[in-house]
Each structure stands twice: as C-alpha cells, then as structure tokens.
Amino acid sequence: QKEVEQDPGPLSVPEGAIVSLNCTYSNSAFQYFMWYRQYSRKGPELLMYTYSSGNKEDGRFTAQVDKSSKYISLFIRDSQPSDSATYLCAMRDSSYKLIFGSGTRLLVRP
Amino acid sequence: DAGVIQSPRHEVTEMGQEVTLRCKPISGHDYLFWYRQTMMRGLELLIYFNNNVPIDDSGMPEDRFSAKMPNASFSTLKIQPSEPRDSAVYFCATSGGAVDTQYFGPGTRLTVL
C-alpha cells in the first residue's frame, strides 16, 4: 500500500464549477501538507502549504487537512480552463523528504 | 531570477551509454533535490543535498545512479550504464529558507532505447 493515495482522475468539470481534490495517507507522522500544480511538460509548482490540521485559503483555492482521518483536500472555486492541469498532493514528516501522491488530472471545460 | 535551470531538456540515448543530467539551482538556495517522474511510479525523490552535502540517497534505485554537488551552483545526476527502464522525466528542485517551498526546474526527458 502506498503511503499517499490519490485518485488519478481524469476529472472533467464545466467552467465555474467547484472542484474537490483529495488525498489520503497512512503515516501519522506527516505534519506538513502541500498541493502542487503541474501543467503538461512542466515542473510542479507549489500552490498551497499547510501545517497540521485546519484550513487555509488563498484566492479561489482552499486547502483542508484532517489529521484524525488522515485526509487532505484542495477546493477550487469558480474553476477556469486555465486550471486544467495535474494536481499533486505532497506531505512530509520532520525530515525534508516529500512524499507525493500520484496526481489527479483536472480538465475544466469552457 | 532565472529559476532552476536543467540541461539537457531532452536526451535520447542507447542502452549501456552513460547519461549525465545537470542542474543549476536558484542562487542562495541551500537545498537541492533530484526527482524522477514516471506514469507508473509518479514523482519519486532520488536524493537531496544540503549545503552541497548528500543527506538522503535512499531513493537512488541502484548503484548505476550517482549524484554530485561540487559547489553551490551546480549538481549532476549520472546514470551509468543506462537501461530502458530509466526512461523518465528527471526534475531538479531547490529551496532555501522556507524549505517546503521547493522550486522545480523544467525537467529533463530521458529516453533510453
């Protein structure tokens, strides 16, 4: 079993929809949680970073962490075609080694 | 700032050949990470350096892989001899200060025939 599980999608939504992306994990030592966005043939770029449980909002993006359920989410409001990309969750414990999910492909249809 | 620079962007080689991938980190960043991305295994950390010193190389798949960071401005990942299963996109990422903000380079797409 992988340490981090993520539905690969693809997830197809109409423009303006609310998107929910999720990851589950098994290592209770993880305490730093991140979401990266990767466009085709590009390197991943950091979208959101949260520490421990709770919510964090940045514009149209909201990241949620529920450590009791070992579950993290990324919500995208008013989705745009430019949001079409692969979204990777990542997490780590006290070391600097990031463990990535397999990524969810998102397509936002105009 | 130019960001993380990787070269070459694409590499096609034949099985058994030596392959060298290069990375120039963002100036001032003291952490450097090498990742490999494939459809089957996703994004995997191979090795990372802090202040030019290798800290964790547990992700290096086998002895055919080696990485060096001779100075703060340059790192290499070498595969010798290369095999078809090494075909992947190899990313270099660097960070400094806020360690979790890893900045990724554009990647090197390696194809081993």
Image (cartoon, rainbow, N blue to C red):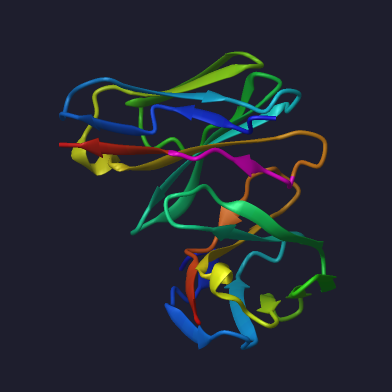
Q: Can residue A30 be seen in this view?
A: no
Does B106 lie within the magenta span?
Answer: yes
Q: Quadrant of residue A63?
A: bottom right
Q: In which quarter of the image is residue B113?
A: top left
Locate residue B100 relative to residue B47 in the image: left or right: right
Locate residue A13 relative to residue A24 in the image: left or right: left
Q: Can residue A56 be seen in this view?
A: yes
Q: In this view, does A23 lie above or below A52?
A: below
Q: Is residue B25 above or below residue A92?
A: above
Magenta range is B100-107
Q: Which residue is drawn at 16% across and 30% down?
A: B15
Q: Where is residue B41 in the image (x, y as percent from the top left)?
A: 39, 56
Q: Where is residue B66 in the image (x, y as percent from the top left)?
A: 42, 23
Q: Which residue is drawn at 62% across and 26% down?
A: B25
Q: Is the magenta stretch mostly helix, strand or loop?
A: loop
Locate residue A89 relative to residue A103 in the image: left or right: right
Q: Where is residue A84 in the image (x, y as percent from the top left)?
A: 51, 70
Does A89 lie within the magenta span?
Answer: no
Q: Which residue is drawn at 42% across and 77% down?
A: A10
